[in-house]
Amino acid sequence: MLDFDEAERTIWAGRAAAFRDSFAKLCAHTAPALLDAAGAGPGIRLLDVGTGIGTVAAAASARGARVTAVDAEPGMIELARQAAPEAGFRQAVLPELPFAAGSFDAVVANFVVNHVGRPAASVAAMRAATRPGGRVAATIWCSPAGAGHELLGRAVESAGVRQAADAPRLDPAEDFPRTEEGLAGLFTAAGLADVSCEPVTWDHVASPEEWWGGAAAGVGLIGQSVTRHGPETVGRIKAAYDALVPEYAGPDGRLVLRYHALLASGRA
């Protein structure tokens, strides 16, 4: 079995465009609050860790920040460059950040700490890259994450498909509670001061076709649970999905998916 980080790299490899066209829109919701927590503004040297398709990098650049961004997946960096042409980009994987200590006024990570094998070391690396007095902010999914993943999970189960037994699992010694206290504890253990953590809840609206498209392309663990099977099984999952969609749809037929996350910040 691949270790957690290797498995994550495999899951995301070659799926940047599929992510852009589906779940990236969900993740974009927290970008303004994340940048507010980091104090992003004109002239601020900001590092966006795990930039994905560059949503946060572009939003920070629009605020006048001097943005550097990193991601592990080359395809993500290619799309991020298009979204944020003013930013600088490098390929890197937490907790190995290729920057001198104190290089940035603020470091942010939008739904990245969920996807690393060493969460505590990753937050510590973010702090190390931040100048004394600078800000670190991150979002993670909490449990349950949201209705969209519930919908897809129910479709998989309704089709009689078992979740993959070999799905990547975090080493118990590295895991932490996906709660306000758990995420705040990571920040405090990393040496950050004035730590705060708050829940964020919102309704994500998407067409049934768009939401299914992310899963059908194998984006994320939920997508992997769909695409690891043959066409006949995928067809059964899709039929179950279509049958469940009305439970999650608004009056216009689009899905209205309630999501929950946590936003933590602290001072280096």
Image (spheres, grey):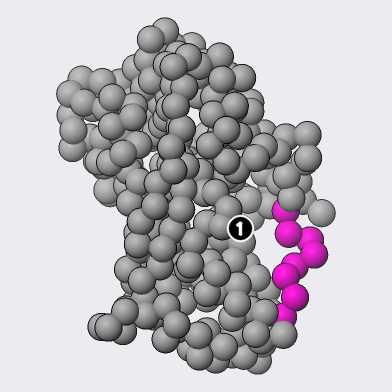
Q: Position of residue 140 (x, y in %)?
A: 50, 43
Left or right of 4, for residue 16: left
What residue is shown at x 72% (from left), y 85% (from top)? 160
Give the quarter of the figure containing the N terminus: bottom right
Look at the image and say whether residue 40 sits in the magenta stretch: no
Q: Which residue is mark 1?
A: 11
State the extent of the magenta-drawn residues as a range: 161-168
Query: Is-magenta flag for residue 166?
Result: yes
Where is 136 relative to 134, above or below?
Answer: below
State whether residue 258 is above or below residue 71: below
Task: Please indicate whether residue 111 sits to the left or right of residue 174 in the image.
Answer: left
At 52% from the left and 56% from the top, the residue drawn is 145
Left or right relative to 216: residue 263: left
- Number of disc labels: 1
Q: What x and y, as percent, mark residue 177?
A: 65, 40
Q: Quadrant of residue 223?
A: bottom right
In the picture, measured across the screen, residue 251 lies left or right of residue 222, that is left
Asked whether the viewer can see residue 78, the reply is no
Q: Residues within 10 Å of mark 1 (few under 14, many from 20)?
A: some
Give the position of the C terminus as an image quadrant: top left
Q: Amino acid at mark 1?
A: Ile
**Which of 133/87 is in front?**
133
Q: Is residue 8 visible?
A: yes
Residue 76 or residue 156, whichever sits in front = 156
Residue at 36% across, 71% down = 256
Q: What secondary structure predominates along the stretch shown in magenta? A: loop
Image coordinates for residue 51, horizontal then vertical, percent: 41, 42
